[in-house]
Amino acid sequence: MRLELRICKHCYEGDHGNEQKTAVTQDMVACAEQVREYKDLIGLDALYITKVTEGDPGGAEALDVIVASIEGDQVALSDTQLVMEDGDGNMLVYPEPKDILQVLTRNLNQIQEQTRQDVDVELSPEGQALIA
């Protein structure tokens, strides 16, 4: 199984001025980095973290799936999503930050059951509120 977390680089770095979105985006990346470090314990082949900026052509590093929506007359590509590909090539796409955090924290819980290492990630109050 492979995963790719795709996030907006500007949201991650706080350039947009939305502190809540920055905190949640940083939580997603912190969780993904921890899952990637211990991925072998839960049978993941790879976990990619891709930080995209406006104008990037899709931005997918490994799993070429992009969520789109219609905003007015325009097609808008999602800058935040978690893509999972199973061994049969089936893809699951999670575009909502709440779902992304739930998937990643569940992965961390599975990892915690397999190791004596502390793999917990301290989530921001905003991230904690999303998955509560």
Image (cartoon, helix red, strand yellow):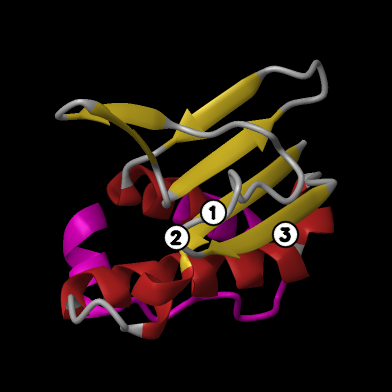
* Identity of the residue drawn at 34% across and 76% down: 123
Q: Secondary structure at mark 2?
A: loop
* Identity of the residue drawn at 64% across and 62% down: 49
Mark 3 vs mark 2, foreground winner is: 2
Mark 3 vs mark 1, foreground winner is: 1
Q: Which residues are magenta?
A: 105-132
Magenta stretch containing residue 107, yes or no? Answer: yes
Residue type (three-letter) at the residue carrying disc 2:
Glu
Nearer to the camera, 132 or 26:
26
* Residue 63 x, y percent position in the rendering: 71, 38
Instruction: Give the Cα separation between the discs numbered 3 and 2.
Output: 39 Å
Q: Is residue 95 above or below residue 48?
A: above
Residue 112 appears anywhere in the view: no
Magenta stretch containing residue 108, yes or no? Answer: yes
Residue type (three-letter) at the residue carrying disc 1:
Arg
Q: Earlier in the sequence, mark 3 or mark 1?
A: 1
Q: Is residue 57 above or below residue 128?
A: above
Residue type (three-letter) at the residue carrying disc 3:
Gln
> In the shown orientation, is residue 87 left or right of residue 68?
right
Quadrant of the snapshot with the C terminus: bottom left
Rate crowding at label 3 as few (under 14), some (14 to 19) or many (20 or more) other CA atoms within 10 Å: few
Residue denoted by label 2: 54
* Residue 108 x, y percent position in the rendering: 56, 60
> In the shown orientation, is residue 62 left or right of residue 58?
right
Query: Which quadrant would residue 43 be assigned to in this image?
Result: top right
* Identity of the residue drawn at 35% across and 72% down: 11
Rate crowding at label 2 as few (under 14), some (14 to 19) or many (20 or more) other CA atoms within 10 Å: few
Residue denoted by label 3: 114
